[in-house]
Image: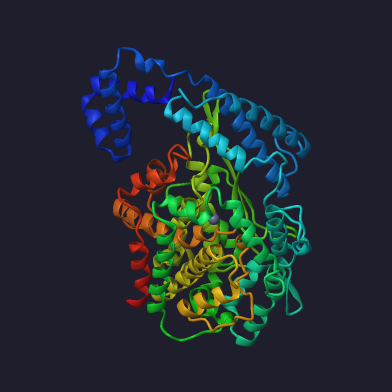
Amino acid sequence: MAPRLVVFGASLTLFLQHPRLYIYVSQNPRYTVLIQTTCLLLFFLALSPLGKAAEIPSSAAVAETEAIYADLADSYGIISTIDSDLFANYRGKDRTAWEHIYSEKRKQLTKMLSKISTAGLSPLDGRAVDVMNRHLRDDFPEEFNDQNAPPEHCQDAHRRDLSVKSLEGALHSCFTEVGNNLEFEGKRLTRVSALGMLEEINEEERRKKLFYAFEPLWNAVDGKHNATSPYRRLLPLVVSAEAAHGSRIDSAAKTIGVSSQKVEHWLEQILDTWRQVDGREMVEPWNYGYRGGEATRLLSSVTPKDSFVPVNQRYYRDLGVDLHQLGVLYDLEVRPGKAPLAYTDYVTRGRLVDGKWRPTVVRISGSYATGGLGLLNELVHENGHAVHMMAIHVRPAFMDLGDELFVEAFADVPSWNTYEPAWQRKYLGQAASEAVSLRGLFSSVMFDVAWALFECRMLHSPGADPNAVWTDITSRYLHIVPHPELSWWAMRVQLVQLPGYMVNYGLGSVLTADIRQHTREALGQFETGSPQWYSWTSEHLLRFGEEFDTSTLLKQFLGRPVSPQALLDQIRRIGRQ
Ligand SMILES: [Zn+2]
């Protein structure tokens, strides 16, 4: 039966048999849309000849297609996991067997989807078909490709005949081949470890040397810093490839219901607020991380890498969710060839099997060679993605996370607490002061905002000189001494792997602060846990997956449009000290 009919039938039954319960349900904001829909249906049913609503076509064909779709998504997740080296076999089958399943399911799905017309389907079935078509086009390519290990090598980035995807792949490989092999004091370091060390090394000369250890990476991405550099050849290709459906910045803007111009304005407003509370002293780029890193240094003895998983487990348990029980798979050791950034992904997605819910399986990949507050925060963020995935409980077509901006912003909702003194006291046994902690959080958030603004401007004017654009932003707002001769913006793999993606972190901070504020209004402070946090957040925000547009979901959750005010208030806490 069409789900909307089920809602209608259930509401009518509820109203007739339990009027008081119906009033309770109808006063719960989560049900408002359903109730409104039901009222509208009742109204139209009254106007139409009897039995008209029963003509909504059966959704059997859609359900059958969704079962194939679920198999396709699972085979994709399993192959990705095998390629990440977490395991070699799954459910008794090796990679070749799973790849065979992937291509068979993809063929079947393509055929079935091509036969379904959305005309005459219920709105929810119609949406399910649209969502599956979109993911089939964007996320499940004919040839399986592992996003975290593209076939191209870094040196391919010099070739002029590459497609946009291949050039992105080649530049992504630069972060694995070069970025994960930075040479410093006779040792090889990963980019992530080196960035952490820039916050911790006390001698300025050593910090400067470590900063310059990134130079091979900058040069791999930006060549000879002229118009022929791989990055500068990539941008026009990205812009023309996205001309038809808009950039990642356009979709991030759509997620929170504003224009792309407004996004750029907000980013500038956020950076300007930081500029005001930050003081006026200019710093060299190799000192920026150190200046914001006081909390990391103060807490380094209580944040060894071995503590990351147990601290996460304790903290999430206090938030009402047991990571161990959820069965999250961790792959956190450093090894050669590993993806150059931490990420969380599905192995298999939850679904009904013989009427019983088979839970989602999630894995987290990270490379933790060292400890530190910044990296601990990163793992709390990745677990934020994991609990989000685990909370989704819908039909197969909607078993995905929603818009990227929301996904990244949500993962920071729990992770920002690691920079609250109360959190540090409870989970680490000691704390930095509020000003020092918040400076630690926001100096790295501001970097993300700066990269987001950088990408807005670069994608707007792909012919611009990236060094000049980056120097203008970082000197004006972050008080960093200009070094236009260096391509030191090329520190983040997302800039080349998914140009425009940084907006999801930069602008994501607006949404993170807003969701955190709304959560505090509903549940009270949750810095040191809140037993209802997970069930409440799941019920009101997470469990729907892609059943609704993310913008609709956020509007319903917040009860008002997204605003940068909560973030600006948080940044100003630093100045109040
Ligand atoms: Zn993330």
The percent coordinates of residue 402 (x first, y second) are 49, 45
Point 60% across, 76% down: residue: 198
Q: Compared to 228, does 31 lie above or below? A: above
Instruction: State how the image is colored.
Output: rainbow
The percent coordinates of residue 174 (x first, y second) are 72, 64
Point 51% across, 44% down: residue: 401
Q: Compared to 221, does 333 lie above or below? A: above
**Can residue 239 be seen in this snapshot?**
yes
| The one of 188 and 429 positioned closer to us in this rendering | 188
Q: Compared to 34, does 564 lie above or below? A: below
- Residue with the most extreme top position: 50
| The one of 436 and 459 positioned closer to us in this rendering | 459
Quadrant in the picture for the C terminus: bottom left
Count of marks, rendered view: 0
Does residue 215 appear to the left or right of 402 in the view shown?
Answer: right
Q: Quadrant of residue 213?
A: bottom right
Point 72% across, 69% down: residue: 220
Q: Compared to 309, does 544 lie above or below? A: above
Does residue 24 appear to the left or right of 330 in the view shown?
Answer: left
Does residue 422 appear to the left or right of 136 in the view shown?
Answer: left
The percent coordinates of residue 471 (x first, y second) are 55, 78
Quadrant in the picture for the N terminus: top left
Q: Quadrant of ligand 1?
A: bottom right
Does residue 443 appear to the left or right of 38 in the view shown?
Answer: right
Point 54% across, 32% down: residue: 396
Q: Quadrant of residue 516?
A: bottom left
**Can residue 497 be seen in this snapshot?**
no
